[in-house]
Structures are given as structure tokens and as C-alpha cells.
Amino acid sequence: MEWVETIGKTIEEAKERALDQLGVHEEDADFEVLEEPKQGLFGRVRGEARVRARVRPTQARQKVDRRDRKRSEKADKADTTATTDQSPAPRQRAPRAPRAPKAATAAEDSAALSNTKPSDAKPAAAKASNASRSKARPANAATASGTTASGTTASGTTTNDDRVTTDNERKEQLVDARQVGEEAVRFMTELVSAFGLSGTAELLEDGDDLEVRVHGQELGLLVGPRGTTLQAVQDLARVAAQRRLGDHDTRLRVDVGGYRERRRVALGAFANQMADEVKSSGVARVLEPMSSADRKIIHDTLSGAAGIATRSEGDDPYRRVIIAPAND
């Protein structure tokens, strides 16, 4: 990202203005003091402080390292396979001879057989035969009716399992967008309280588009560097609403302390500045990797710019926007 210059009565004030333009925290920015205010007569300050700042660049991971790592992993697997093939076969144990039954058990069995009369054996056999026939009848009846394991009969009749599935689908369709928004507001309120912070959450609705805005002081902990923590918080709010209410088609966005609006304004100004440079030089500019939300801001800002075309290239998290002349 290019440098931006700001002025202020003090160096700190100039830095704050630069951070507002960049939309990042102080630890994510580089500063250079161009001019300091001078001390005049009677303790008065003459002049203004001038600083320039930019977003601290991040170095992308080299793909060569990943290819080397994959090669080393394949080599390790090959060595392990070779070692396994060369290992001697395990020794097989001789099968154990079956144990003889206890003497007491054998004696009891023989006594039971000797005490059984022929007249008693016939009713017992008849009862066993009747029991086996009664067990076989339900299975045959089920087969004859043509009911399958999935709960649908051969004639195409819907069974109870399909009715349960239909009821669940109806419940998912009945999830209202307002219910999802209220659940997200409840989650954010409890999250702010769990962090020991003070803030309030409100819900903004636009059809199925929902936005939960959290207002308060000292909420930077929920934003994080370049909004990474805020993105994770937004995903958690969406999952919390989905687990409590079920699947829904609403689009949920979370903003903390007005960060997204400040970020949108800063990126819009930056996009227009880059577009002017591309027009004057005729050379395309490749921006640093951005999240999908930031890339969308760049595309939307320059969608109506004359003589300018934008496109995204690469894979996340290194996907970036390219601003080029329209005829390029």
C-alpha cells in the first residue's frame, strides 16, 4: 500500500489521522516523521507536525518451500514403506488345544439327560417349533408388504421416516430473518460482556441482509489487526444462530465500533488514488493481498470509473486485486 501524508498540531494527532485514513491499528502501520512542530517564544508552538504512514507489508510464503516439504514427505513415506517391507514376518503361535469341560458341568449335563422323560421332550420340542414359526411370520409379512429399509414401500407410499424428514424441512423453511438477527444480537451482547467490555448491539435489517452493529468504547480487542478478529467473531455469530435455529438463507454481517465503515472509506479513497495513477501512467497496479470483503470494496468503488478495469487473481489468503487500464 502507498504512503499517505497527514498533518496535525502534534505528532500523535497526525498519526491518528493517518490511522483513520488507513483503517488499521497502530501496530499494523509504519510511520515516518517528516516535520515536527517547533517551539516558539513564550512556549508557543509554531508550525504543524507532518507524518507519512502506510500499512505494514506482509511477506507472502514462498511456494518453493511447500513443494520441498511435499517432496520430503514423499521421501519419508517411501523410506517407511521400504523399512516395513524388509522387516521379518512375525512368528506365528501354535494354536492352543481346546480346554476340556469341567467335570462338574459334564456331570450335571449327563444327570439332566438321564432325568428327562420321553413324554416331556415332545411338548418342549412342540413349543420350540411354535416359537420359531411365530418369529418368522412378522418377517414374512413385512417382506410381503414390500417395505424397504429406507421407509418407503414398494408401491411408493411414504412412511413415517419420510414424514419426519418433511417436518424438519418445514422447520428450516420457517426460520425468520429477524430470529437470526436477534440470536446474533444476543450472542454479541454476551460476547462483549464475557470480554469484560462495555457496549451495546443493535440490529439493522434489509430483507435477508442483516447487520449487527456493536457500539462502545475500547472495542479494538474484538477487531484485531486488519479486522481478522472481527471476521472470526462474525463467523462465530453466524454459527451460533445456525446451531440454535437451524439452517437459514440470511446474510449476516457484524461491525464493531464502526470499523467496517472506516475501512470502507479508507479503501475507497485508496482505490481512487490508485486508479488515477493507472490512468496517468497507463501501467496496471497490483495491490497487496486482501480479504474477500476488502476486495469487494475495491471492485465496487471502481466499477463505474471510466477507463479502468479491475480483476482478482491468486488463491486465498494471497488473492489480490489488479487495477489496469480498460483496454489492457
Image: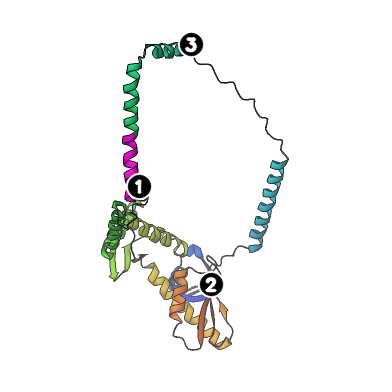
Quadrant where the C terminus is found in the figure: bottom right
| Label located before the other in sequence (1 or 2) | 1
Q: Position of residue 239 (x, y in %)?
A: 37, 57
Q: Where is mark 2, residue-wise? A: 320
Secondary structure beneath label 1: helix
- Judge whether residue 202 is colored magenta: no
Three-letter amino acid code of the residue under disc 2: Arg
CA–CA distance in space, label 3 to label 1? 47 Å
On the picture, is 224 further left or further right than 96? left
Residues shaded magenta: 133-148
Q: What residue is shown at x 33% (from left), y 46% (from top)?
A: 142
Whether 199 is drawn above or below 81: the answer is below
Three-letter amino acid code of the residue under disc 3: Ala
The image quarter containing residue 253 is bottom left
Secondary structure beneath label 2: strand
Q: Between residues 130 and 243, which one lies in front from this camera angle?
A: 130
Q: Where is mark 1, residue-wise? A: 143
| Label located before the other in sequence (3 or 1) | 3
The numbered disc on residue 103 is: 3
Q: Position of residue 188 (x, y in %)?
A: 32, 58
Check contact, mark 3 vs mark 1: CB within 8 A: no
Check contact, mark 2 vs mark 3: CB within 8 A: no
Secondary structure beneath label 3: helix
The numbered disc on residue 17 is: none
Colour treatment of the image: rainbow
| Front disc: 2 or 3 | 3
Residue 190, can we see it? Answer: yes
Q: Between residues 181 and 46, which one lies in front from this camera angle?
A: 181
Q: Residues within 10 Å of mark 1 (few under 14, many from 20)?
A: few
